[in-house]
Image: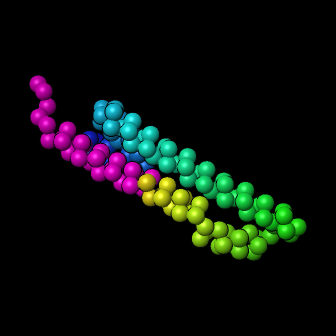
Amino acid sequence: MSNVIKGVLFSALIFPGAGQIILSRYRRGAVFFVLAFISGILCVTAVVRQAVVMLQDIVAAGEVATIPRVMGIVAEASTTASSVFLKISFFIMFCCWLASVIDAWRIGKELDEKPADI
């Protein structure tokens, strides 16, 4: 399997930075991994925070948590400031993933074109 395919598949399907690590670019791989991991943690934190607020609103109103009621609250919450934070976190994670795939492709191409030492 060529280095291009290996690097791109690992970065795209496993985790951002995995392709760089497979291609022996450990520092770059670690940077992509850390950035994607931190933005992933921020995304999960924002989602859990929104879920807690929604459930507290339902309990405070003395209502039963039905699917239509939860869907209505989710629709209302999607316009709050925390959803902007969530969108930014997702955008950073997507950009990190895309940059990792492109960088792995570039490194793999470089390694494939490099003459083999005899």
Residue 47 picture location, percent across and down: 62, 56
> Is residue 109 a member of the stretch shown in magenta?
yes
- Residue at image x 18%, y 42%? 110
Extreme residue in the top direction: 118
Relative vertical location of residue 60 with respect to residue 92 in this rendering, above or below: below
Tell me residue 36's x, y (percent). Answer: 45, 46
Q: Is residue 115 left or right of residue 12?
A: left
Residue 72 percent location from the top left of the image = 71, 74
Q: Quadrant of the N terminus?
A: top left
Q: Residue furthest front?
A: 81
Residue 50 falls left or right of residue 67: left
Report if residue 37 is visible in the image.
Answer: yes
The magenta region covers: 93-118
Number of numbered discs? 0
Q: What quarter of the picture does the C terminus occupy?
A: top left
Residue at image position (33%, 51%) is 99
Q: Quadrant of residue 115?
A: top left
The foreground one among 76 and 113 is 76
In depth, the one of 69 and 67 nearer the eye is: 69
Res 9 seen here = no
Q: Residue at x 88, y 67 (%)?
A: 62
- Residue 58 rendering spot, x and y as whole percentages: 80, 66
